[in-house]
Image (spheres, rainbow, N blue to C red):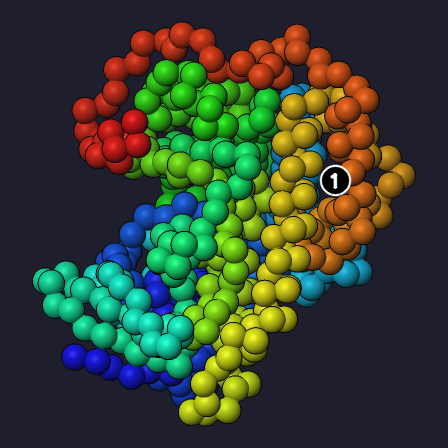
């Protein structure tokens, strides 16, 4: 069986649902093939203010607001110092001046709100459908083959196949376009039943704490749970010789933010999950008959919570581009040149700021310089930083380049003070306190990762 559509969308996360809703609202015939059944767990609970205007365009802002925690900004802890990013302190380049706030969301609820909206607007949403092959004719992708939960196979053909499969990157992997970034880091995370006691977490701020070449996060979620995670180099994790569960529980006991940021004896209420490489890209983002959106195109370390916004903004760009094409005409790969150029700028400048972030994590002198800049007369630089962390990633590009180069210079010129364990490159590489895991949690994902 073969079914024809204007667009075949692979994946029903924020990128896939956004492009599906916008196309369906315009009367296009679209299908969303989602491998899982919603609601389902997903990481990425911290959103950015630049995304709020997309919520409004989709018609989901009220639903998101009612099921989320209001997020006024984000704050990083550099040892005993704090670096805040208050979203109201933007510069005149910010796109979110009307809505200088965002949300902390439960992705099970958030993603379902978005995909339900796609169905309301007329998109054909098919859960439990896994894409198993691409259909290619004369060098062009013209559709996909998908299998449903009971094994039925079907072909789905369209003018455009949109890969929104996130880290699965169906098209990127099939066409051998996927490539890892140089610095390989991993994330380990779970949800805990506890009350936030860190004052900023109580108020809805994202809160993160640096350590040498890594960081932890604490996010207050709307259902009385707290998202907790740690990011560190893959190579260091191997040296620690612990399971992901053991390391995360150790961080909850020992890390200042996690230990002191929530009530004592938190109860883990989810599996411990692992993202094995928090950084990869694709050699190209579009080709004949296909285009990638969101994490399917590239995935950047989430220290600036950029993922959901890039997903939804890239999906919006693709939807608008498709709607500009004449009906019934084959869409050439050249139509996506400007799209790819803009997304590559996002990738370039976010990556530079991420690299500057990790330089600071490895150099206490640079940390002090950053804190001093936050408190000094250089308020214009602080406002540019807020515009960046608010989701305007390719604006103020000269500022971003200066931050990157200045961080490299300071790191080269001044040594790192390693008197504190968390400032040392061997942080966490020592014997772990014996830990007895709880018996009421299924750890299939943990055993798989270990």
Q: Residue furthest right?
A: 377
**For this rendering, which residue is in front, 321 or 336?**
336
The residue at the point 59 percent across, 65 percent down is: 340
x and y percent of residue 119 in the render?
32, 75
Location of mark 1 (residue): 404
116 is higher (above) or lower (below) than 357: below
The residue at the point 79 percent across, 19 percent down is: 414
User: Would residue 190 appear left or right of 410 to someone viewing this image?
Assistant: left
x and y percent of residue 8 in the render?
35, 74
272 is higher (above) or lower (below) than 162: above
The residue at the point 10 percent across, 62 percent down is: 150
344 is higher (above) or lower (below) than 200: below
Disc 1 is placed on an element classified as helix
Q: Residue furthest bottom?
A: 327
135 is higher (above) or lower (below) than 168: below
x and y percent of residue 219 in the render?
48, 39
Image quarter (top left, top right, bottom left or bottom right) of the N terminus: bottom left
């Amino acid at each position: 069986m073969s079914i024809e559509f204007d667009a075949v969308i692979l994946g029903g996360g924020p990128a896939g649902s956004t492009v599906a809703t916008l196309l369906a609202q315009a009367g296009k015939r679209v299908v969303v093939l989602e491998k899982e059944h919603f609601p389902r767990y997903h990481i990425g609970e911290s959103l950015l203010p630049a995304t709020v205007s997309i919520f409004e365009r989709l018609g989901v802002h009220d639903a998101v607001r009612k099921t989320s925690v209001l997020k006024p900004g984000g704050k990083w802890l550099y040892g005993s110092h704090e670096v805040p990013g208050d979203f109201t302190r933007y510069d005149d380049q910010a796109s979110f001046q009307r809505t200088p706030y965002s949300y902390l969301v439960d992705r099970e609820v958030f993603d379902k709100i978005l995909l339900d909206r796609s169905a309301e607007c007329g998109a054909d949403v098919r859960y439990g459908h896994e894409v198993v092959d691409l259909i290619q004719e004369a060098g062009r992708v013209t559709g996909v083959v998908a299998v449903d939960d009971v094994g039925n196979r079907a072909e789905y053909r369209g003018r455009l196949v949109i890969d929104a499969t996130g880290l699965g990157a169906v098209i990127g992997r099939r066409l051998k376009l996927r490539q890892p970034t140089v610095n390989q880091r991993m994330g380990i995370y779970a949800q805990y039943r506890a009350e936030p006691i860190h004052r900023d977490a109580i108020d809805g701020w994202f809160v993160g704490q640096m350590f040498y070449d890594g960081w932890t996060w604490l996010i207050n979620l709307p259902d009385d749970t707290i998202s907790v995670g740690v990011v560190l180099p893959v190579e260091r994790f191997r040296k620690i010789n612990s399971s992901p569960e053991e390391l995360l529980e150790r961080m909850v006991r020992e890390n200042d933010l996690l230990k002191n940021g929530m009530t004592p004896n938190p109860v883990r209420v989810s599996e411990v999950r692992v993202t094995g490489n928090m950084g990869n890209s694709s050699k190209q983002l579009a080709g004949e008959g296909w285009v990638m959106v969101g994490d399917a195109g590239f995935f950047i370390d989430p220290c600036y919570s950029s993922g959901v916004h890039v997903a939804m903004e890239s999906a919006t760009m693709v939807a608008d581009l498709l709607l500009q094409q004449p009906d019934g005409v084959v869409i050439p790969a050249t139509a996506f040149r400007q799209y790819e150029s803009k997304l590559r700028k996002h990738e370039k400048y976010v990556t530079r700021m991420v690299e500057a972030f990790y330089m600071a994590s490895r150099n206490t002198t640079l940390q002090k310089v950053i804190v001093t800049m936050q408190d000094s007369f250089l308020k214009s630089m602080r406002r540019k930083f807020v515009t960046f962390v608010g989701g305007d990633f390719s604006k103020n590009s000269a500022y971003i380049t200066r931050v990157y180069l200045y961080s490299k210079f300071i790191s080269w010129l001044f040594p790192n003070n390693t008197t504190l364990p968390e400032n040392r490159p061997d942080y966490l590489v020592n014997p772990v306190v014996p830990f007895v895991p709880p018996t009421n949690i299924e750890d299939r994902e943990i055993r798989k990762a270990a």
